[in-house]
Image (cartoon, rainbow, N blue to C red):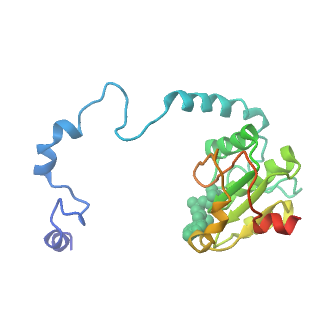
């Protein structure tokens, strides 16, 4: 079978995952050059900002107080050992939301991360953050979280089906990490969430 695939798309062909060794050798100095400046070509790692953010994240560790496993007292729905959005990811999201005090969060692809956003919204913002969760396959725990917190709107569509006007309401100063987009200024036009809330 492997040999058959190799015949159709030989090593180095753009459909083949196998590189053409001759071609790699020809460019080996460029490909394997050890960079002394720790740079990644084409990507600005913005080291100073990253280190600053590491400190910011660290300063919120003590507030990150969630149970390891699901609790039945319903103080919060998020729990750490969820197998999906754990540890540093969750702590970073938690810290950024508190630190940057966004007016709005848009999550494209929602789940355990959304439980963090809704919980922070309740505990630290008195539900003032406008949260939109774009998720075509909402899980039971996400639905449970939305019912529990009642401070987020679920848009149960694939992002590509969401009307573009929804995104046009996003303004400058947008911070984007993975699947959330807080912003520091208010929207020009009302989203469905705002319309429902007013
Ligand atoms: C890796 S999960 C992340 C979920 C959540 N952010 C978390 O960290 O718990 C990716 C999510 O994207 C959702 N998804 C897949 N295709 C999508 C689409 N076209 N538009 C929006 N969400 C989508 C999936 O259903 C899934 O829940």
User: Is residue 172 visible from the viewing direction of this image?
Assistant: yes
Q: Is residue 41 above or below residue 35?
A: below
- Determine whether 70 is above or below 101 in the image: below
**In this rendering, would 27 be left or right of 46?**
left
Q: Is residue 27 shown left or right of residue 105?
A: left
What residue do we see at 73% from left, 47% from top? 185
- Residue farthest along the top direction in this orientation: 36
In the displayed structure image, the side of residue 36 where residue 156 appears, left or right: right
User: Ligand 1 is located in which of the four quadrants?
Assistant: bottom right
Toward the front, the furthest residue is 188
Taking depth in this image into account, of 146 and 108 the one nearest to the observer is 108
Would residue 84 be visible to someone looking at this image? no
Of residue 97 and residue 169, the one placed in the foreground of this image is: 169
Residue at the image position 67 percent from the left and 45 percent from the top: 93
Where residue 157 appears, x then y in whole percent? Answer: 64, 74
Q: Is residue 35 left or right of residue 3?
A: right
Q: Is residue 56 above or below residue 90?
A: above
Residue 29, image x, y percentages: 17, 36
> On the rendered image, what quadrant is the N terminus found in?
bottom left
Q: Quadrant of residue 138?
A: bottom right
What residue lies at 75% left-to-right and 58% top-to-bottom? Answer: 131
Q: Report the front residue among 154 and 76.
A: 154
* Image quadrant in which the C terminus is located: bottom right
State which quadrant residue 111 falls in: bottom right
> How many numbered marks, from 0 up?
0
Give how far across and how far down residue 8 sits, in percent: 16, 73
Residue 186 location in percent, x, y? 76, 51
Q: Within the image, what quadrant is residue 167 found in?
A: bottom right
């Amino acid at each position: 079978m492997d040999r058959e695939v190799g015949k159709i798309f030989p090593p180095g062909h753009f459909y083949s995952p196998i590189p053409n060794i001759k071609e790699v050798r020809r460019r080996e100095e460029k490909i394997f050059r050890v960079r002394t400046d720790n740079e990644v070509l084409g990507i600005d790692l913005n080291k100073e900002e990253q280190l600053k953010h590491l400190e910011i994240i660290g300063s919120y560790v003590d507030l990150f107080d969630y149970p390891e496993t699901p609790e039945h007292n319903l103080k919060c729905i998020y729990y750490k050992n969820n197998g999906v959005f754990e540890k540093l990811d969750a702590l970073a999201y938690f810290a950024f939301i508190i630190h940057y005090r966004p007016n709005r969060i848009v999550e494209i692809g929602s789940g355990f991360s959304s439980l963090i956003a809704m919980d922070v919204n309740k505990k630290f913002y008195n539900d003032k953050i406008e949260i939109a969760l774009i998720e075509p396959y909402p899980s039971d725990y996400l639905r449970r979280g939305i019912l529990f917190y009642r401070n987020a709107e679920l848009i149960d569509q694939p992002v590509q089906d969401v009307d573009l006007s929804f995104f046009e309401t996003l303004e400058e100063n947008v911070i984007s990490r993975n699947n959330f987009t807080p912003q520091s200024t208010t929207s020009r036009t009302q989203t469905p969430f705002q319309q429902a809330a007013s």
